[in-house]
Image (tube, helix red, strand yellow):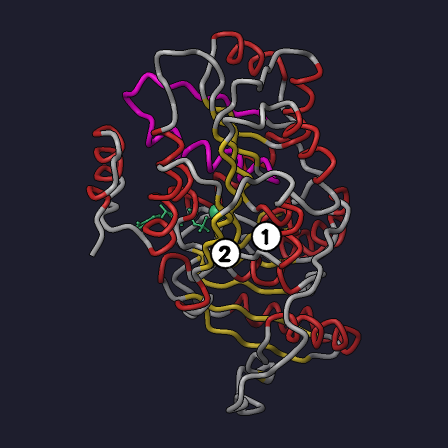
């Protein structure tokens, strides 16, 4: 079996992995690290919670010349929380190397970020809006970027972010730039769009062999619209060892649902894009530490968030696409842990649900509100339309 020692990594990286108690590479790491070390462009698809951050992060560190203060690596992600998390991983694996990193995202004073950039840093992790802001102010220069990563690539290349991402990529120098895209979902259109950014990319798709999200146990429950809230309460009353993440659709809806639950005495926090950055940070801190057992969130928490003790994801309201469904439920069952995903369907949700199941290519088990199975699993896998063109809703709604 491959070990991290089989890759040509710095001693500091091996030491950092040891400190993180990470010993064996995951399949996506074993498949993506060697070609990335050779300088190849790749599109890496592997299920949620399978270690994609280190798959691009470890080769990224190898690409850095610590003797130069030029910016050499740029990692673009869709949300502030994910920027913080990815930067946290990058900080762990660059510890003691002298490599400097800047974390650039909105909702925060720009001054300290400018100071960090002025002092010089080789790696930037951030969200597109703020990075463009720094480019416009000329506090960030990207011509020297050699290693570019789009994490959650299908979202970064979809309508909402694509223009910003395109403008950022255009400021880098194409020759000599290695580019990689990572996501749990890479709809076919991603490959076409990616052709503009990638040179002869290697396509790595892990879930074809491994089975996607198999450690997540699904329950889909049809309820009347009026009983939805009571069913949610029953679920929240169940005893669990880990945390619960409840997804709603809109910022207002999520805020109201959270307030209603808090009034009833549930230990709930809310995460949505209308909160101040300080509030968002506090909510994430409390949820990560386990002091808040229930988080009610919009899709802002759907992608990338790595909180290992999330035991259940509840879709109180459906996401727009099957890709988003995959990302939402992928907040649980990470790195082989067990997880439950419960999806509540009101009568009006059925057409969209059928579309999501078609996109997933399988039917998920139905249960009654009391948790009893109502229909056996079909013995033949459901065959549907397969991949569909994912569409991102406007960022302002989450
Ligand atoms: P993804 O981006 O694929 O959703 P992450 O990069 O967030 O997954 O990693 C998920 C979790 O797995 C993290 O907590 C990370 O520390 C852990 N992890 C990553 N690589 C390994 C490994 N080789 N062995 C054990 N745990 C790992
Ligand atoms: Mg990730």
**What is the CA distance from the residue labelled 2 to the residue labelled 1?**
7 Å
Query: Left or right: where does residue 275 sit relative to residue 287?
Result: right
Where's residue 165, x and y in %? 67, 34
Q: Camera-side residue: 351 or 246?
A: 351
Whether residue 194 is in magenta: the answer is: no
Category of crowding for the residue at label 2, using alpha-carbon neighbours closer than 10 angstroms: few (below 14), some (14–19), many (at least 20)? many
Q: Is residue 18 left or right of residue 38?
A: left
- The image quadrant that residue 198 belongs to is top right
Question: What is the number of the mark on residue 92?
Answer: none
SS for dot 2: loop
Q: Which residue is mark 1?
A: 302
> Residue 331: which disc?
2
193 to 278, vertically: above or below: below
> Residue visible at 51% across and 46% down?
201
The answer to whether residue 66 is above or below residue 275 is above
Name the spot of residue 141 as percent of width and height, x first.
59, 15
Pick whichever, 372 or 363, lies toward us.
363
Quarter of the figure with residue 150 = top right
> Is label 2 in contact with label 1 (beta carbons under 8 Å)?
yes
Tell me where the magenta segment starts and ends, as one range: 78-104
Q: Residue at x 56, y 52 (%)?
A: 295
Q: Which circle's residue, 2 or 1, is located before the other in the chain?
A: 1
């Amino acid at each position: 079996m491959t070990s991290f020692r089989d890759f040509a990594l710095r001693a500091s990286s091996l030491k950092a992995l040891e400190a993180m108690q990470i010993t064996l590479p995951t399949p996506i790491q074993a498949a993506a690290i060697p070609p990335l070390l050779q300088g190849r462009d790749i599109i890496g698809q592997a299920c949620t919670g399978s270690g994609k951050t280190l798959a691009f992060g470890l080769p990224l560190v190898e690409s850095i010349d610590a003797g130069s203060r030029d910016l050499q690596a740029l990692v673009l992600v869709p949300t502030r929380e994910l920027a913080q998390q990815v930067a946290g991983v990058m900080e762990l694996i660059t510890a003691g190397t002298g490599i400097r990193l800047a974390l650039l995202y909105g909702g925060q004073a720009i001054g300290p970020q400018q100071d960090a950039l002025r002092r010089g840093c080789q790696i930037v992790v951030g969200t597109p809006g703020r990075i463009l802001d720094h480019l416009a102010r000329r506090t960030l220069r990207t011509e020297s970027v050699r290693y570019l990563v789009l994490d959650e690539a299908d979202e970064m290349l979809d309508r909402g972010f694509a223009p910003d991402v395109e403008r950022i990529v255009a400021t880098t120098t194409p020759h000599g730039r290695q580019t990689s895209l990572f996501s749990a979902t890479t709809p076919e259109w991603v490959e076409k769009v990616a052709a503009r950014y990638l040179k002869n990319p290697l396509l790595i798709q892990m879930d074809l062999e491994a089975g996607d999200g198999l450690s997540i146990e699904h329950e889909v429950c049809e309820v009347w619209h009026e009983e939805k809230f009571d069913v949610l309460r029953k679920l929240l009353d169940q005893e669990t060892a880990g945390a619960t993440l409840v997804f709603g659709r809109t910022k207002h809806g999520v805020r109201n649902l959270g307030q209603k639950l808090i009034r009833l005495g549930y230990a709930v926090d809310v995460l949505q894009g209308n909160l101040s950055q300080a509030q968002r940070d506090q909510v994430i801190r409390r949820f990560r530490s386990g002091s808040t057992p229930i988080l009610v969130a919009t899709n802002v928490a759907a992608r990338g968030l790595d909180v290992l003790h999330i035991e259940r994801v509840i879709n109180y309201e459906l996401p727009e696409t099957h890709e988003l469904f995959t990302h939402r439920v992928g907040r649980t069952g990470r790195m082989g842990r067990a997880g439950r995903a419960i999806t509540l369907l009101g009568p009006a949700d059925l057409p969209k649900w059928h579309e999501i199941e078609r996109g997933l290519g399988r039917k998920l088990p139905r249960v009654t509100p009391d948790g009893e199975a109502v229909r056996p699993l079909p013995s033949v896998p459901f065959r549907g339309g397969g991949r569909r063109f994912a569409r991102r809703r406007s960022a302002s709604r989450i």
